[in-house]
Image (cartoon, grey):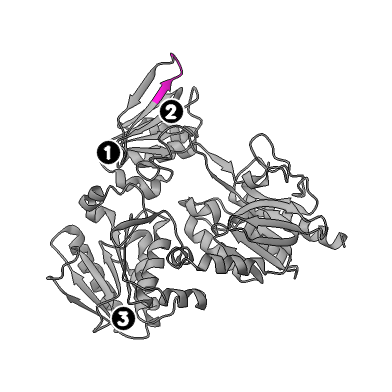
Amino acid sequence: MLDAGLKTQLAAYLQNLRHPVELVATLDDSKAGQQTRELLDDVRAASAKVTVREDPAADVRKPSFLITTPGSGSGVRFAGVPLGHEFTSLVLALLHVGGHPPRHEAELLDAVRALSGPLHFETYFSLTCQNCPDVVQALNTMSALNPNITHTAIEGGAFAAEVAEREVLSVPAVYLNGELFGQGRMELAEIVARLDTGSASRESAALNDKEPFDVLVVGGGPAGATAAMYAARKGIRTGLLAERLGGQVLDTAGIENFPSVPHTEGTQFAAALEQHVRGYEVDVMPRQRAAKLHTDVETGLHEVELETGAVLRSRTVVVAAGARWRTMDVPGEQEYRNKGVTFCPHCDGPLFKGKPVAVIGGGNSGVEAAIDLAGLATQVTLLEFGEQLIADEVLQRKLHSLPNVTVLTQAQTTEVAGDGRKVTGLKYRDRRDGSEQELAVEGVFVQIGLLPNTDWLTGALELNGRGEVVIDAAGATTAAGVFAAGDCTTVPYKQIVAAAGDGAKAALSAFDHLIRTS
């Protein structure tokens, strides 16, 4: 099952086990069942502290296995084969059940242990989803620490009938005690906050009490992370607030154009960014969204008001808020989001195997999505508003070579249709003759570009017609002491390496401003 390299890595990781781990398997004769048996044999061979036994009579999903300690009935369960992006989740589950401490703040881990139950989580994931591991690992950590919490991570491909019955059309999809709890990326602290309702007010109060920063960075992507590192290296008080550390990079499958890094995955790049930032004296404040920017005329300090109501103060600010997926803004789009309307072909594509789908957008992202989906869907229809596709020629040639792909140009999407539970079709207007048309599809993949996250800056900074922050060559905005960098600005090229460079420039400009003003 595992190649020699993975076996070597697994054996090295499992040297950190502090006490014995038992794998209790409930298998069947399916292909997934055989693969699970082979995987468990490889894990057992990697450490003398790991034992495997089968419990064919257990009333659980088949194939599945429980990671537990001998004599205990609780632990972490995987249903299906956790390979691909989830192999790391498997390794961490083994370590945490085996006594190796999770890498989270002690206060957060104590909050997990204090949760009352019973809380039974189920997470549906796909092996190609780069967003799923964070959720799976967070819930695995919770079930390893608290006997009142159980978690089963379910590989959707191995349980296709169950996925169809529950109408799971976007992963990760998390159920708590049988009811939908959430979809999309969630971190451990976010999950705990939803279960411990008092934590939000405590966190807000703690933010309000913080002393003013010298530099406050808003945004945790490549621009924000780089700005925070450059500011901290100057020895000044630096804070970084972000809704999610990593930003858009977390939604990127492969990165092959960052100098000195021939290839990496978006989630790995984001994790490395976070680790690098936390290596400096940066006050990192994750899961926070800015709501307003203004300046206190009496103190001269810039104030960033958060959606929670908390206010952070700083002598200078670097805005690196990034961008988000552009939506079609048509009837049915929001109603059926995660019910057939999706923005990530890598994550959700496997859920539409054997179904007809549509892709909106004829740029590189849209054409790449259509190519990927053609290997899964029965029919892929790509709709482009303009007269022709704008993707690279090499991608267009590949697209047109696929027999189950249809390209519609001058097609304006007007509505996403559904039956109240999921997508059933897509309506569009043929811009050539004005006629109204309809497609029978079960998935709509929106790939029409990005919008800057700058709504909260209206009236505080100059924005151009696209909502981007207007900056000069030094990253300065129209407000003294406020700088900006990355995809939320007027820089023409939205690239990781460009954003990182602009983040460094903005931080250096902020430092220069500080030393020249009282």
For marks 3 and 2, give the CA distance: 56 Å
Labels 2, 1: front one: 2
Task: Name the mark nearer the viewer: 3 or 2.
Answer: 2
Q: Residue 309's x, y, as percent? A: 62, 58
Mark 3 in CB contact with mark 2 (< 8 angstroms): no
> Closer to us: mark 1 or mark 3?
1
The type of residue carrying mark 2 is Thr
Q: Is residue 173 visible?
A: no
Q: Return the mark for residue 47.
A: 3
Q: Which residues are magenta?
A: 428-433
Measured along the vertical axis of the image, is residue 149 above or below residue 467? below
Name the residue located 20 percent from the left edge and 63 percent from the top edge.
61
Residue 413 — which label? 2
Q: Is residue 368 visible?
A: yes
Which type of secondary structure does the marked residue at label 2 adopt? strand
Secondary structure at badge 1 equals loop
Pointer 1 residue: 355
